[in-house]
Amino acid sequence: MTENRAISKAKLQIFADHCAAAAESMAYTLHRTAHSSFVKETEDFTTGLATPEGLTFASPRDLGATWFVCLDYGNVIRQVENYEEGDIWITSDPYSGYVATHTPDIHLWKPIFQEGEIIAFAVSHIHNTDVGGAVPASLSRTLTEVHQEGIRIPVCRLVSNGKLNEDLLKFMRSNVRVPEQNWGDLKAQIAALQTGERKVRDMVVKFGLDVFKEGLVGILDYAEEQARQIVAGMSDGSYEFSDYIDEDSDGGRPCRIALKVTISGSSLKLDFTGSDPQLQSSLNLPTGGNPRHALIMVGLTYVLYAVNPQILLNSGLARVVTGTLPEGTCVNPVFPAAVGMRSMMCKRVQGLIMGTFAQVLPDLMPADPSSGGPMVNVNAVDFRTGKRVVACINPMPGGGGGSARCDGTDGSGGNEGYLKNTPIEISEIEAPVRISRYELAPDTAGPGQHRGGMGTILQFSVVSPGTRVTARNRDRSRFNAWGLRGGREGQASTFLLNPSRANERNLGNTDIIALVPGDVIRITSGGGGGFGDPMKRVPSAVLRDVVQGRVSIEAARDIYGVVIQGNEIDEKLTAERRGTTNGVNSFYTLGQGRREFEAVWNEHNYRKLTEVLSGLPYDWRFFVKHSLFDFIGQKPADTLRLDGSDVEEAFIQLCAQMPALTRAVSAVASQH
């Protein structure tokens, strides 16, 4: 950390507040002028200010996505040799600097000059509802390479000397399904950058150029100092945890993400060794191996902010982190791996980080948020206008995790709580659907002394032929949100076609489906994990949940030990039931799906699997993982050794069957 004595802490705070207000003004401009419901209602966008080197130093707190506090534009800024006044640059390519992390995210940056020198950049991103590609809304776990995920824009000049690059715009409009929607959102982004430039010039007038430049250095240093104070207050040591995505591909195997956090003094190491190989699906998280990447830092930012809500939110926080994201894994894939659904992986990484730090800060970290509800997009020809629409009708975050202080948030999971719901009226105007239910889902919250948050139910019917629904980020139908300190896991998410009809079908984690008029979709997002023994929950709180429809009478009796008769607590029967029922005392409470899986794929087997896969070329790893899973799955349960030797034996047999695999192993060994 560089020492900055020119500006006092009080003045740095004032300067930081001005910067945040500038970013907030940018966000307001974008929010009020955007066209798509996913931006103007759901608020999947960001605005901000970055240093001349590209480090984000200001972000809004009240509008937009909260994942990009530590975003570093440096890798794309350095690709431009010469900036000029009036420039705006653009990219959406996940492999052009790892700033855009999937193709729907359009990132813009505008240099702000003062006296011929770049003093800052105004930056922004939005998530376009559709950027072309193989499926409506561009994203599905069924896709296997980035080329299928819509247009990729490398680093290009969008505006030169205030004049729009019409050829680039024509190219963009001709490759998306609803070009006027994308163009409207792009204009809103450009307007936000103009606002940012104006606000920076106002700050230069107010503070002076020298103080402005010193302030940028100072607020990054101050955030680092605050982060180091927090980390220094934690107990030194190593802490490990892992979590899963239900499927590593369409109908595939579970995907494991593993983390080891090492705390030493005021520094942290994040080691993701043991995570699965890069996937032949779009769930990969493109980080370029940078453990300070913005999408890796989200969970840690939440941890730091939970300890000190007054902490400055900027890229200085990331300086406390070093670590390892092994190349060729699901958290650091190599081109041309598909990455469109990286938000699901990101959310699981966030929960994983918070879950690991629960061992360090057990009274502060919450149980797991559900993170299994999808973004629901509809692609159809609107019978009212004859026009094709691609619209997000609602995000469906599950419930938040319970904590030592309070219940989890209903219908708004902690690591995606920034996503706003879209009013039913707006959804029905923008897409040819009829919504019949949008409500909280009873008995989905993980029971606990402080229960998890409830999931939500969305049910709608389609009215146009040729309708396709994409439900990206479908998950948590097998591996439920885990509970903490005796709290139980949240309920799983569900995805049903034509519920309660003769042709009802459970769609599992399917994320794209073709529908006909009259078809009904019902989606239930999962509940957050509970915190603490449910038997210790205040009986009056259980009664309130029952009266309000959050918990059934049966669950109150069987899980919470509270017997309710006629909207009143039967004190005698409740005392008897609570006196004879033993609570769960484990630190983590894992759902049945995870317990069954880890009964076979325990730490020994997974350690051996990681060892085997790390010795293979990237293009072999996913195939070999699935082959070894098949081998172990075919062995009788009473013959499994569970010490890793079965995995080693399976790999030896696979090499014997495939000489090409043996040669691949030898080639990698010779390189090392």
Image (cartoon, rainbow, N blue to C red):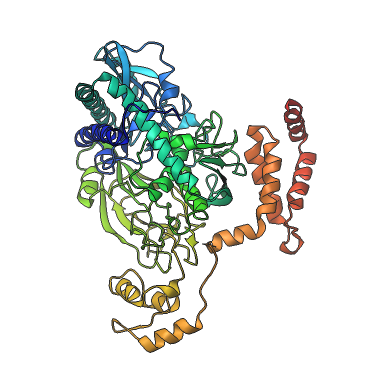
> Is residue 54 found left or right of 61 in the rendered image?
right
- Residue 533, x across and y down, in percent: 46, 70
Residue plotted at (39% across, 65% down):
451
- Residue 64, x across and y down, in percent: 29, 40
Total marks shown come to: 0
Residue plotted at (39% across, 89% down):
572
Q: Look at the image and tell me whether residue 140 can be seen.
A: no
Give the answer, above or below, for where 610 lies relative to 659: below
> Is residue 544 found left or right of 25 in the rendered image?
right
Give the answer, above or below, for where 453 lies relative to 30: below
Q: Nearer the viewer, residue 603 or 206?
A: 206
Q: Nearer the viewer, residue 647 or 324?
A: 324
Residue plotted at (49% across, 38% down):
282
Q: Look at the image and tell me whether residue 75 can be seen.
A: yes
Give the answer, above or below, for where 146 lies relative to 577: above
Q: Quadrant of residue 83?
A: top left
- Residue 446, x across and y down, in percent: 43, 64
- Residue 297, x across and y down, in percent: 45, 39
Q: Quadrant of residue 495?
A: bottom left
Q: Nearer the viewer, residue 86 or 199?
A: 199
Q: Residue furthest right?
A: 656
